[in-house]
Image: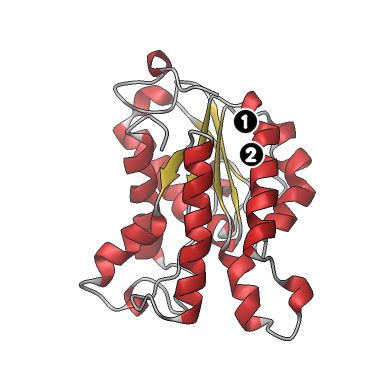
Amino acid sequence: MSFDPMEADSGMLFAANTRLVMIGDSITDCGRARPVGEGPGLGNGYVQFVEALLTVDHPELRLRITNMGISGNTVRDLKERWEEDVIALAPDYLSVMIGTNDVWRHFDASLRPETWVGPEDYERIYAELIERTLPLLKGLILMTPFFIEPNRADPMRAMMDRYGGIVKKLAARYSAVLVDTQAAFDRLLEYYHSYHFAYDRVHPNHIGHMVLARAFLEAVEKGHGA
């Protein structure tokens, strides 16, 4: 896949009148409509904010946005539903944010290793999904998982950084646009406690979701790969 700057508007990644599918876990889901989240069914999280910001800042795009997040998903779950929830929707652009549960299960389900997704499996499955889909897309956006915790020595933060590093590597390998969500939160954690953005350091409140949406818009407005 190559990003043609002639298809974008003033440095914006997206071409006008095309479809963006956004897939992930509960952070993407946020109460979106079933079976397909669109229009008023986009949910109350960052996907809704992305639509609002794009509509206000780039009304000429008239972008169709679809939310296909499902709470609790890992990259293994994405693989199971990829054909129906990505390929069948024929997106022009695809945004993926997955990894939170792949990491979290190591901590909240420590006695059930069958629920874990180790870093090797995470990278392998993620890469398989990208390679399967990339030829069908005009553009791919990869969003890192995050943990809203300033102490990088915290075990879950350290593991989340490792998985985020895998996403960065995949974005570089496949010339995808990278949205470094952890860096976006880290900048604000210099001034605010994590509770200002999420009660459990994972599920953002309205401010946290705006952090994600702004980070997304800043990345796609560059209009090029990592």
Total marks shown come to 2
* The N terminus: image quadrant: top right
Residue 50 falls in image quadrant: top left
* The C terminus: image quadrant: top left
Q: Are marks 2 and 1 in contact (CB under 8 Å)?
A: yes
Image coordinates for residue 163, horizontal then vertical, percent: 53, 61
Residue 152 falls in image quadrant: bottom left
In three-dimensional space, the C-alpha distance between marks 2 and 1, rounded to whole angstroms, equals: 6 Å
79 or 81: nearer the viewer = 79
On residue 134, which mark appears? Answer: 1
Amino acid type shown at disc 1: Leu
Q: Residue at x 66, y 66 (%)?
A: 118
Amino acid type shown at disc 2: Ile
In this rendering, position of residue 223 left or right of residue 200 = left
13 or 30: nearer the viewer = 13
* Above or below, comparing residue 106 to residue 222 in the picture: below
* Above or below, comparing residue 65 to residue 184 in the picture: above
Residue furthest to the top = 6
Q: Is residue 44 visible?
A: no
* Above or below, comparing residue 72 to residue 16 in the picture: below
Tell me the element at label 2: helix
Q: Residue at x 65, y 48 (%)?
A: 126
Image coordinates for residue 89, horizontal then vertical, percent: 69, 33
Q: Residues within 10 Å of mark 2 (few under 14, many from 20)?
A: some
Residue 197 falls in image quadrant: bottom left
Q: Residues within 10 Å of mark 1 (few under 14, many from 20)?
A: some
Image coordinates for residue 42, horizontal then vertical, percent: 55, 48
161 or 94: nearer the viewer = 161
On residue 130, which mark appears? Answer: 2
Image coordinates for residue 58, horizontal then vertical, percent: 33, 29
